[in-house]
Image: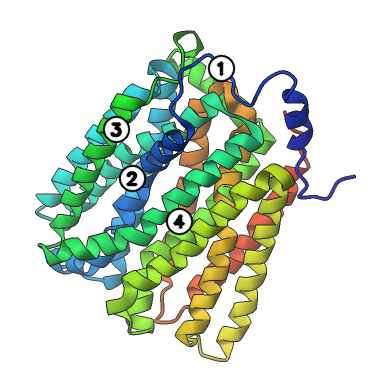
Amino acid sequence: MCWPFSDPAHKADASSKRKTTHMSKPQKRRLPFPEYVALVAMLSSIVAMATDMMLPALGAIGHAFNVAHENDVHYIVTVFFFGMASGQLIVGPLSDTFGRKPVILAGYVIFVIGCVLSIIASSWTMMLCARFLQGVGASAPRVVALALVRDEYEGRKMAQILSITSAIFILVPMIAPALGQALLYFGDWSTSFWGLIALSIVVCIWFFLRQPETLTIEDRRPFRVGVLATGLKEILSTRIAVGYTLTVALIYGAFIGYLGAAQQIFAEVFDQAALFVLYFALTSAAIGVASLVNASLVMRFGMRRLTGLALIGQTTLSLGFCVVLLGYDGVPPLYLFLTWQMCSFFCIGLTFGNLNALALEPLGHIAGLGAAFVGSLSIILSLPLAALAGALFDGTVMPLVTSFGGLGFLACLLMLWTGRAQPD
């Protein structure tokens, strides 16, 4: 009998060393490992750049479009994620049919078009539609990058790579708000979108020139409704994939809720609007450190064990802090809030790479569709949770901390339920 959060994959990993080297097709040409990891991280970073660079400009955007209710400004973030979730349902299967590279490149084109439409938007509705289109475009590099990694790696090695890329990826939230703030000094809120366009072009050229296609012709699947339906039926009947996808949704719900409310919290609750960028970077650093720690520990202790401990830690910290907040009427000293944030974000950082790797582990033969399912369903389910957290903002941090504790508790229960399944 094993501990509920123990990692059963180590036996498969050990035996697979006699058959493979964690790389499914070693004959393929690959980038040097450091460049490969950096490129995958940059492909994924489009999401963080498109959300976090906007945070300093949210107030200006809301003012420019005469948004009636201040809390509605967070839709700049949530609509983007809704577009990304919708796009993933298409780009994943398309990448299984046409290959990874053309789909990623097409996604960048759509993203840039969305940025241009945001710049010329004449109404709040047009702005939200443009943000939705940006999300659709960003879904391609974000989700297909996961399939690209799954094409070449599996098991704990895949989790290690995703953890390293997550650590690099987390550097983006540390610098993106500062970059967005700096761009505001050179113009209005539209300069943030010009910055996104410039960055996208650089990464797109890098990817086009350096990264070889990872999906061979013989491994591609026809883009037919029947094939997709068969694949989805297989995914939905795979308890491991579904369980970990739902767990990701709960964690994303809390985190996206924070992204939408962060600027308001620091500006209105703590009167620290001028230092928002600094505090945001400080707390984001905790996730990056955790991702690096996870990359070094996951090969020894396993994905499930580390993730289970992290979720227990996040839940305990948040529910305990709720009790502390009662003594401060929901507005604690800033240092206490930052301490809770950094500790909770450290726990979250231990889960990001692991949960995605766990969900994709049994789906290697349909990696594109599998990555689309995991990414899309987790975000779609997380958005109502995030929107609820944003709408409940009441001038205190109690709704945010409560959402972290409650959703963390549900995630622990899901981990236990999912862990009862044997690996496929």
Position of residue 329 measured from the top left corner of the image (x, y, whole percent): 51, 89
Height in image: 366 above or below 257? above
Q: Earlier in the sequence, mark 3 or mark 2?
A: 2
Mark 3 residue element:
helix
Q: Earlier in the sequence, mark 1 or mark 2?
A: 1
Q: Name the residue beneath numbered marker 1.
A: 25
Q: Name the residue beneath numbered marker 4.
A: 384
- Amino acid type assigned to the residue bearing label 3 in the image: Trp
Q: Quadrant of residue 69?
A: bottom left
How far apart in space, not on screen, are marks 3 and 2 (Cα)?
Answer: 14 Å
- Amino acid type assigned to the residue bearing label 4 in the image: Pro
How far apart in space, not on screen, are marks 4 and 2 (Cα)?
Answer: 22 Å
How far apart in space, not on screen, are marks 1 and 2 (Cα)?
Answer: 28 Å
**Along the line of sight, the residue nearer the viewer: 247 or 42:** 42
Residue at image position (61%, 25%) is 234
Which quarter of the rendered picture does the C terminus lie within? top right
Position of residue 146 measured from the top left corner of the image (x, y, whole percent): 48, 34
- Mark 1 Cα-neighbour bin, 10 Å: few <14, some 14–19, many ≥20: some
Closer to us: mark 3 or mark 2?
3
Residue at image position (60%, 45%) is 355
> Is 69 on the left or on the right of 238, as rendered?
left
Q: Quadrant of residue 386?
A: bottom left
From where the camera sits, is residue 86 visible? no
Residue at image position (38%, 83%) is 269
How far apart in space, not on screen, are marks 1 and 3 (Cα)?
Answer: 23 Å
